[in-house]
Amino acid sequence: MPIDDSLAGLTLHEAHDLLARKEVSSVELTRSLQKRIAQVEERVSAYLTLTPDLALQQAADADQRLAAGDATPLTGVPAAIKDVLCTAGIRTTCGSRMLENFVPPYNARVVEKLQAAGLVMLGKADMDEFAMGSSGENSALGRARNPWDLERVPGGSSSGSAAAVAADECFYALGTDTGGSIRQPAALCGIVGLKPTYGRVSRFGLVAFASSLDQIGPLTKDVRDAALVLQHIAGHDPRDSTSAPVEVPDYARALTGDARGLRVGVPQEYFHEAMDEGVRQKVEAAIAKFEELGAQVDRKVSLPSTPYALAVYYIIAPCEASANLARYDGVKYGFSYQDGDNMWDNMEKTRQFGFGDEVKRRIMLGTYALSAGYYDAYYLKALKVRTLIRREFDAAFKKYDVLLTPVSPTTAFRQGEKLEDPLQMYLSDVFTIPINIAGLPAVSIPCGFSQGLPVGLQIIGKPFDEATILRAAHAYEQATDWHTQKPPL
Amino acid sequence: MALTPEEVRHIATLARVGVSDEDVRKFQEQLSQILDYFQVLNAIDTTDVPPTAHTLLLHNVMRDDAAGESLPPEQALANAPQRDDSYFRVSSILEE
């Protein structure tokens, strides 16, 4: 087959099928994607670092594996990796001046696992600095745009990962999700984004933001692809003591296309007035579609602590961040200011010039909330409310298999719109944050368009039951064609 | 919950983040607004509710104290801003 632009529009599993049937080689597939990147990247800006030579070398290796009959469903299918995941020998910046020239000496566990499966890495994707943000605009090194409207943000913090998948600049991407950073950009870019259960995927080699909330997951063009990628990154890892020794099921088997008998709950607290009318309509229509498909839908579910989740998150996450980011002292790696009066002056200026405003805000918030006299009022209080939030989910999941909610209260917003108002920016994650607080799995899937911009449906599941949310998502996807729509690039 | 400029500077010092006068003005307003928002939690009764630090049912993950591979010194030092032989070089921490 000749190198053809249309190859870039394929899903991961469609690209795999072509490779398996020897209709195209991985090198051809990779060159085709690199051509696509050359055409649209100037407008989309999804990548911080491109690795063209590495990609072609990995593609050649993949072709050997394919020829030898030693391929996995991921072998030779080009991908993007969020720049918060360590890649040995390739700079890993976290979208920060602090790590602009940082070259990790080892790979993240997920990168190792994808390499073992036959990874072809096209490059490292843009992101909000240290994964703190909901628009991509906090990146100090790039400015990813929404492929559906280049004047608008792709969402964040996995901004480049979502933009790259939506713009057909890769077949799939890895992102990370601490408060919505996979699901919200997936929703705003009209693709699928899965946040696995806390503990499902090893975080070894993931640059830490908030260690009790962070989780790695796939951004893909359809639900089958999300299941395939999760299959290859999930599992226990002794190097991450928070990775759970829980068996990983065969996710593809969950994709039955059948939603009959599925017990679906719709928590009322996720449908408040602050939501865009267009988003509400599309999400309501998606819920009705589940009824049509034979699911038992209960719209009267109540999770009364939901309105407190945002405050809980913006205490816990900054507290953990203030501890995690203490490591950036200009001594061992990263940006280092050296012309100060003394050691403290150097350290303070290293952090003053190395970090952007949002990172500083969160470090300072966390420092304040953990400081003597405030610990009980903020951090401990937040951890207690966290217990209530988790209990309410646990109780709901005794009655329902999945919960359906919107992903974000709005569609993609304009660049700059919320940049000077941190609290407004935080509200963009109001529906995704409770899921991280409770450590649950959730997926965002496309469920329509409002004024030409994608809307996402969030499907939330029980801990370690990614299979059921994938089953529900797949059944809905089979009955709709939102996921096949492409942005006008 | 309005922070004073002095409080902002104090927090910045605790966090070892240098701040300009402009930063202090900006963070004073923004952090005060966010701390105000946190007051919503006062409406919730958490008497007798235990805290949840993380959501996994795992405690005290242990492993055998066995020697394994570790990062070779050259790799560990490869990103060092300043090094001296096989050491990280730091500025003096003791006053003359």
Image (spheres, rainbow, N blue to C red):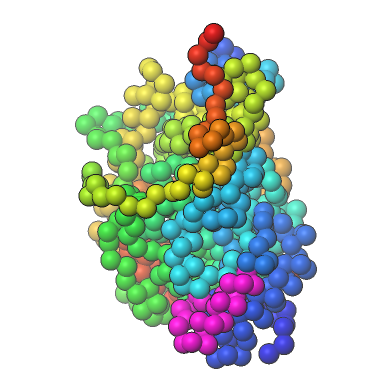
Q: Quadrant of residue B21?
A: top right
User: Magenta includes A70?
Assistant: yes
From the viewer's perspective, is A406 left or right of A403? Answer: right
Q: Residue at x 69, y 76 (%)?
A: A31
Region in magenta: A55-77
Q: Residue A319 is drawn in which quadrant?
A: top left
Spot occupied by residue A290 in the image (x, y as percentages of width and height): 43, 71
Q: Residue at x 53, y 41 (%)?
A: B77
**Can residue A445 be seen by looking at this rendering?**
no
Residue A320 on the magenta segment: no
Q: Nearer the viewer, residue A169 or B80?
A: B80
* Residue sitting nearer the eye, A410 or B91: B91
Picture residue at 44% right of the left edge, 33% below the top: A323
Image position of A477 (left or right of B61): right
Name of the residue lying farthest toward the top: B96
Quarter the C terminus of chain B occupies: top right
**Residue B86 higher or lower than A341, as above or below:** below
Place of residue A148 in the rendered image (x, y in percent of width and height, measured from the top left):
70, 62
Give above or below for A404 relative to A129: below
Q: Is residue A348 left or right of residue B48?
A: right
Q: How many marks?
A: 0
User: Measured from the top left, where is residue A109 in percent x and y?
Assistant: 43, 58
Whole-percent x and y of residue A216? 46, 56
Residue at position x 75%, y 53% from top?
A151
Compared across the picture, whether A21 is left or right of A136 comes to left
Looking at the image, can residue A330 be seen?
Answer: yes
Nearer the observer, B39 or B60: B60
Answer with the quarter of the image where residue B90 lies.
top right
On screen, residue A108 above or below A446: above
Vertical placement of residue A88 versus A69, above or below? above
